[in-house]
Amino acid sequence: MVSRRKLLGLGAAGAAALGTGAVVARSMLDEPPRARAASASDPVPFYGEHQAGIVTPAQDRLHFTAFDVTTDDRAELVELLQEWTAAAARLTQGKEAGSYGAVGGAPEAAPDDTGEALGLPASGLTLTIGFGASLFDERFGLTGRLPAQLAALPKFPGEQLDPAISGGDLCVQSCAHDPQVAVHAVRNLARIGFGRVAVRWSQLGFGRTSSTSREQVTPRNLMGFKDGTNNLKLEDSALLREQLWAAEQDGSPWMAGGAYLVTRKIRMTIETWDRTSLAEQEQIIGRNKGEGAPLGRAAEFDELDFAASGPDGQPRIGEVAHVRLAHPSFHGQARLLRRGYNFVDGSDGLGRLDAGLFFIAYQRDPRRQFVPIQLSLARADVLNEYIRHVSSGLFACPPGVRDAGDYWGRRLFAA
Ligand SMILES: C=CC1=C(C)c2cc3[nH]c(cc4nc(cc5[nH]c(cc1n2)c(C)c5CCC(=O)O)C(CCC(=O)O)=C4C)c(C)c3C=C
Ligand SMILES: [Fe+2]
């Protein structure tokens, strides 16, 4: 197999051989992936108990895609998932999607890799798959396997969802430190899926808006605030077991080790936000803009003190501040692993940027976690004056792929 990085180092003779369409022997250049990503260009292990791309320290770039399955044939769907898994195992290690690659196959055949990532390193690529509730209809004999956790989200006050950019039978979250690598992976999965799946909607993102590890600096969202401070993180193993990973006893044993994913595309009216005073912006969020410290406190990771009041006798963190309404203490300690990205999809034709937050949250049960939190936010959050939810997705992300004999969702399709 040719790793993309190796291809660059082949030298003139090797490059010439590839250029003439020679098929490279799989064993010639194969090498095992390193155990863990050490730098932004390194691979992240693909095999494991959980899918990569959930607690993996959030990469800088996102290409999220939802697919509709266009075949009604269960065997074809299983075959697709097997082919996707094999391609994902290669792509995430910096290899090409297929064993011949972009230039190593027969000249009369379409290449089994599209080529735009040739020469690029793995770039921390992770590919994470999810299954939407619509996959469990009568087409594939999965009706009895629909997890209760995929119950449709309620209609939240104020949302203006566009069905064309919501839902989907399948989703793939592609994250990498290089946008070309993230897009290349999705493009090749779509290519492999031709005739069996069609892209329903997709979203590009940048500037991760959450930290999922204590080793990461907290990034900023497009409102200019640090986002992801009080998040579930990779290091919180007991909390992850309690709040993130589905367990055998949760009702759908095939999901044990997986997690449920909620996506929301949230458009910001940033032009209005940008004309709002600093003091008001900080009141709305409940943290200061510079440090990201809770109002009334000095440092980013200081505890939030909801009882503290200012000189005017009013609570430092207002009753309708975003962080108060979203805090676990108001939701039976429910937490989320947030992993969102900023987006700017050009302009809206009315002189405004089409920009905002592509919110991504993983959890063990959206009915206990995302739904109550979002209900509080939708009812009272002062931030609502500046945001609008325009798309929604809910997916069951199965456990990790154990080894090369396993595939995404194997336990779902097992007899
Ligand atoms: C339903 C869940 C949430 C949505 C939707 C949401 C949208 C949203 N958030 C920000 C900006 C910030 N959020 C912050 C904290 C925070 N947000 C949520 C949940 C949702 N946010 C939670 C659970 C928390 C943590 C609360 C806590 O325990 O303290 C922050 C503060 C920094 C941080 O802790 O991450 C900011 C800033 C925007 C702009 C937005 C929609 C566009
Ligand atoms: Fe938030």
Image (spheres, rainbow, N blue to C red):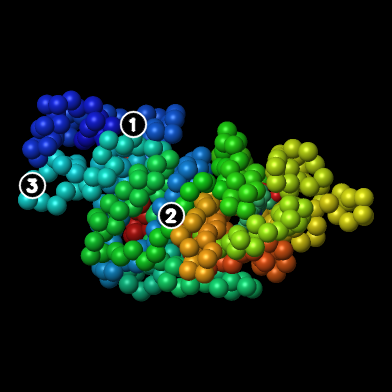
Rendered-image quadrant of the C terminus = bottom left
Do labels 3 and 1 touch, CB within 8 Å?
no
| 14 relative position to 359: left or right | left
Q: Name the front one of labels 1 and 2.
A: 2
- The x, y position of residue 361, in whole percent, is 55, 54
- The x, y position of residue 188, in whole percent, is 28, 51
Look at label 3 and name its amino acid.
Answer: Pro
Whether label 1 lies within 8 Å of ligand 1 gets the answer: no
Badge number at residue 107: 3
Q: In this figure, which residue is indicated by the disc labeled 2? A: 204
Asked if residue 137 shows in the view, the reply is: yes
Badge number at residue 33: 1
Look at label 1 and name its amino acid.
Answer: Pro
Residue closest to the eye, 133 or 338: 338
Q: Residue at x 79, y 47 (%)?
A: 295
Q: Residue at x 41, y 52 (%)?
A: 63
- The x, y position of residue 261, in whole percent, is 50, 57
Whether label 3 lies within 8 Å of ligand 1 gets the answer: no
- Does 133 appear above or below 314? below
Whole-Å distance between the Cαs marked 1 and 2?
A: 27 Å
Residue closest to the eye, 369 or 19: 19
Q: Residue at x 44, y 34 (%)?
A: 40
Rendered-image quadrant of the N terminus = top left
